[in-house]
Amino acid sequence: MTNKKLIEIATSVIKSKKIGSNTSGDVGCALISKKGNIYTGVCIDVMSGIGFCAEHTAIATMITAQEYKIKKIVAVWKNKKGNVHILHPCGRCREFMRQIDPENMEAKVLLGKSRVVKLKKLLPYEDDYCKI
């Protein structure tokens, strides 16, 4: 699957909703598992701070299907003008992906339409991870 198509899938799940002073559903994520299946998710942002990122939702959906390995992942945000922006995964999401399965260190993370890096390049001390 092309990066463009994965970005389109992530964008398609964005359905913003104001909840109090916060907005949920304004960031979408799409990932391809190692088995080739596509999983999507949106962010949930609530006042109490217990919300979570779109990547977490997509990964939870993948795990529900008993898959744990990510091949490629992207998160996007659409502004009020309809422009789509690719978001880098936050530190919590990076660590979450790593802990789900050690092989996810090789997962491709889209940082732009044509810029892709492996997860291990986005984590500090990449060589020390997964050594148990």
Image (cartoon, rainbow, N blue to C red):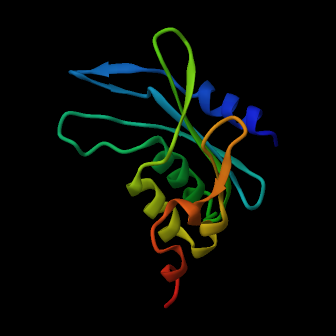
Q: Position of residue 56 (x, y in %)?
A: 46, 50
Instruction: Report which quarter residue 16 is drawn in.
Output: top left
**Residue 76 position (above or below residue 62):** above
Name the residue at 44% across, 63% down: 95
Q: Position of residue 118 (x, y in %)?
A: 64, 60
Report x, y in % for residue 66: 61, 64
Write the residue at 25% across / 34% down: 46
Q: Quadrant of the N terminus?
A: top right
Q: Nearer the viewer, residue 73 or 66?
A: 73
Q: Is residue 19 rendered to the left or right of residue 33?
A: left
Q: Quadrant of residue 124?
A: bottom left
Is 52 positioned to the left or the right of 74 in the image?
A: left
Front residue of this view, candidates 13 and 27:
27
Q: Residue furthest bottom?
A: 132
With respect to residue 67, does 8 lie above or below? above
Q: Residue 53 in the image: x percent, y percent?
A: 41, 43
User: How many marks do you count on the picture?
Assistant: 0
Which residue lies most toward the right here?
A: 1
Residue drawn 49% across the image and 21% down it: 15
Question: Residue visible at 68% across and 49% down?
Answer: 116
* Residue, far left: 48
